[in-house]
Image: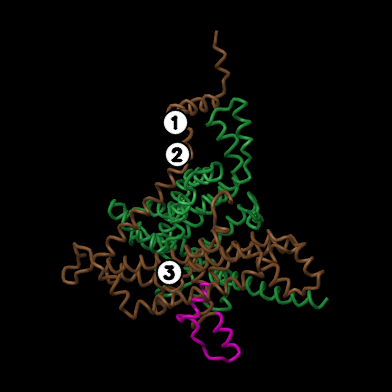
Chain colours: A green, B brown
Amino acid sequence: MPDALAKRLIFGTLVLLVVIVLSLPTIVVLGASFTAGNIIAFPPEGFSLKWYEKIALAADLRNAFGRSLLVALVCTLIALPAGTLAGLAFAKYRLRFTTVLQTYLLLPFTVPLIGSGIALMLVFGQMRLLGQVWPVGLAACIINLPFMIWAVSSSALGLDPDLEWAAQSCGAPPVSTFLYVTLPAVMPGVISGGLLMFILALNEFLVSLLLTDARTVTLPVQIYNSIRSIITPDLAAVSVVFIAAAAFFVFVLDRLVGLDIFLKSK
Amino acid sequence: MRPTTSRYPLIWRVLDGLEAAAARLWPRRFTRATPVLMLAPSLLLVLLLVIGLVELGDSSLRELDTSTFRLSATWTGANYLKIATSGLYWTVIWKSLFGALVVTALSLILAFPYAYMMVRTRSGLLRKLLLVALFLPFFIGQVVRAYGWLIILGNQGVVNDLLGLVGVAPVRLLYNYPAVLFGLVQYMLPFAVLMLAPALTAIPAELEAAAASLGANWVKTLTRVVLPLARPGLIGAGLVVLTLTLTDFAMPAILGGGSQDFIANAIYDQFFRTSDQGLGSALALVLVAIGSLLVGAVFTLFGAGTLAMGRQR
């Protein structure tokens, strides 16, 4: 059938193009990080791990990575309880003023990142919190909170309220019902939401740029500051940290909830 | 004789303690307010942002005194007037808006076949491959991806090296408007596909078969059946891409090399280069207003669509 063939050809070409465009930066960064030369060239001059050795010895990069991990951890630890409870509240109860509440909680998503970043910079500045690392995690949590709430509320739609009634009529008090019935039912949403918060905070750039100074830069900001001057292969090796983290999270996400979950319709 | 409660497992004791504490802190008569309690942490977190926005509004109404480098004590609309009358900011705003529209259109056109194939393919392997190719860059930050494009498109980059092999002189591919838009499309594609895919899943494949059996060719099936049904997904995806692009900072900064500023870059410069907090705040609020107007308009016209939280009404 020529008709179906044309469709397959056009769709196939476009999809192939997209796959290439999506993967090219990752592949090139990976390739550049293993070069034996002193500049980034294509094809790479030989294979070596010397740039990895160099970054492992660079204290500023190591510290920046440590701070990024701390930011991601703080963000996830705050977002997990806050977002889970909010997501459940939306899914379980018919709230009054739902639209108002949703619009309010969507603010971090609707307000542009540069706006939220500067707003939080002003607030943290008045609270004398600037110059520390953990407020960056708090800020990352606030600006990404809608994602956590979405993750939980969409998985809670499958939560059967009868299960909670059943637990209670069997004599389970509220906390036990929550821990043994409600929470396990939404666990896939909690886990994928938590992972998402971690990886978003690890990669967080703009808000970190606004909230950090020379002593508290996170890794993305450090990379940004360096690529503005000169591009050397050690930055490629640092970037591989993020590629590895992303690969790890894709793997874990696939194992825990399955990537196909993102194809499901609500 | 030892009391029989000694066989009471530790976890039960912990739970009993928790239940007692919960009952004391949140007695049964408060039950009606439980949803409010559950929302409280999130509401408080977002409150910090709201306070910041109020402060932003306050300083946007204060003009910078260039002799003392302090903001004025009284409110004035001078900053907004400056933005409205200065050609520079209009240029930046139009550049961002136009860029956002182009990126949105391109992202949707490229994301649609990708999402469609991912949803419809019968091969589990292909689906997994497409999912991984999508999620891997999605989880790699903007800075690293922009860095990859610097390596590829730079003057001594991969593309120019390849062109050199066939005898073409180096072409300046970076630090121009198309480079920024290209980087943004690459950044937005995963968002667009992920917003589109669920909407396509909701369309039964039988509908397409029915259209085909009634004599529609694939173009007609696509434009008359699939695209109209995918509208909520297209709206959701378009909205996300549009607002994220309009307000982006990193791609114009890195791939534009300082010459292709979007609104976010202009705001940053006001705060960190010129140190004019008043004008920077006013610009930020103008951007918030443009973004909210766009989102609000689409929400009221078409509903929150795929962006709604919780129950579908």
| Residue matched to label 1 | B26
Tag 2: residue type?
Answer: Leu
For the residue marked with disc 1, what is the amino acid?
A: Trp
Q: How many marks?
A: 3
In the rendered image, the residue lying farthest to the front is B301
Viewer-closest of A150 and B12: A150
**Which residue is at 25% across, 71% downward?**
B78
**Residue A251 spot, x, y in % from top left:** 62, 55
To which chain does the residue with label 1 belong?
A: B
Q: Is residue B165 highlighted in magenta? A: yes
Q: Residue at x 22, y 63 (%)?
A: B75
- Quick one: SS at disc 3? loop
Q: Which residue is mark 2?
A: B37
Q: Which residue is mark 3?
A: B249
- At horizontal 59% and vertical 34% (from top left) the residue drawn is A180
| Chain of the residue on which disc 3 is drawn | B
Q: Secondary structure at mark 2?
A: helix
Q: Earlier in the sequence, mark 1 or mark 2?
A: 1
Q: Kindly indicate whether the residue at mark 1 contacts the one at mark 3 (C-beta within 8 angstroms).
A: no
Residue type at mark 3?
Phe
**Within the magenta stretch, is there residue B195?**
no
The percent coordinates of residue A123 (x first, y second) are: 32, 54
Relative to B273, A80 lies left or right = right
